[in-house]
Image (cartoon, helix red, strand yellow):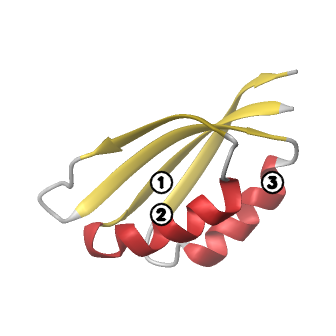
Amino acid sequence: MKIVELNIKIPYKSRGAVLAHLYDKIRGKIRDIHFFPPTADGVSEIRMEIVEDNPTDLLSELKKVIKNGKISFRVLSEA
């Protein structure tokens, strides 16, 4: 089990659709989540910590969902 921090930057207009799909994939694994207000350009930032066995598979699946944004992750701890 690894604790992974995901940093997602997406357009504010598509945030709801992306979060709905994301919630279906990682339900029950979220430890902490922060929503930041959109910038002047309309880009919203979501930062969340999740518990995941294989974060690379999750990242490749999320890249398919998030087409107009950026996603990055880092491993906080390994157990």
In this orientation, which residue lies closer to the viewer: 9 or 30? 30
Q: Is residue 53 rendered to the left or right of residue 17?
A: right
Q: Residue furthest front?
A: 28
Question: Residue 67's x, y, as percent?
Answer: 51, 78
Q: Nearer the viewer, mark 2 or mark 3?
A: 2
Look at 30% across and 57% down and name the residue there: 44
In this orientation, which residue lies closer to the viewer: 57 or 31? 31
> Which residue is disc 3 drawn over?
56
- Whichever of labels 2 and 3 marks the residue nearer the N terminus, that label is 2
Question: Residue 37's x, y, as percent?
Answer: 21, 48
Q: Which mark is residue 50?
A: none
Position above or below: 12 against 27: below
Q: Is residue 59 rendered to the left or right of residue 35?
A: right
Question: Residue 28's x, y, as percent?
Answer: 68, 44
CA gap between label 2 and label 3 equals 19 Å
Q: Quadrant of residue 11?
A: bottom left
- Whichever of labels 3 and 1 marks the residue nearer the N terminus, that label is 1
- Quadrant for the C terminus, please: top right
Question: Residue 32's x, y, as percent?
Answer: 52, 32
* Disc 3 secondary structure class: helix
What amino acid is labelled 1 in the image?
Answer: Ile
> Which residue is disc 1 drawn over?
8
- Whichever of labels 2 and 1 marks the residue nearer the N terminus, that label is 1
> Which residue is disc 2 drawn over?
19
* Disc 1 secondary structure class: strand
Q: Nearer the viewer, mark 2 or mark 1?
A: 2
CA gap between label 2 and label 1 equals 10 Å
CA gap between label 3 and label 1 equals 15 Å
What amino acid is labelled 2 in the image?
Answer: Leu
- Quadrant for the N terminus, please: top right
Q: Quadrant of residue 50?
A: top right
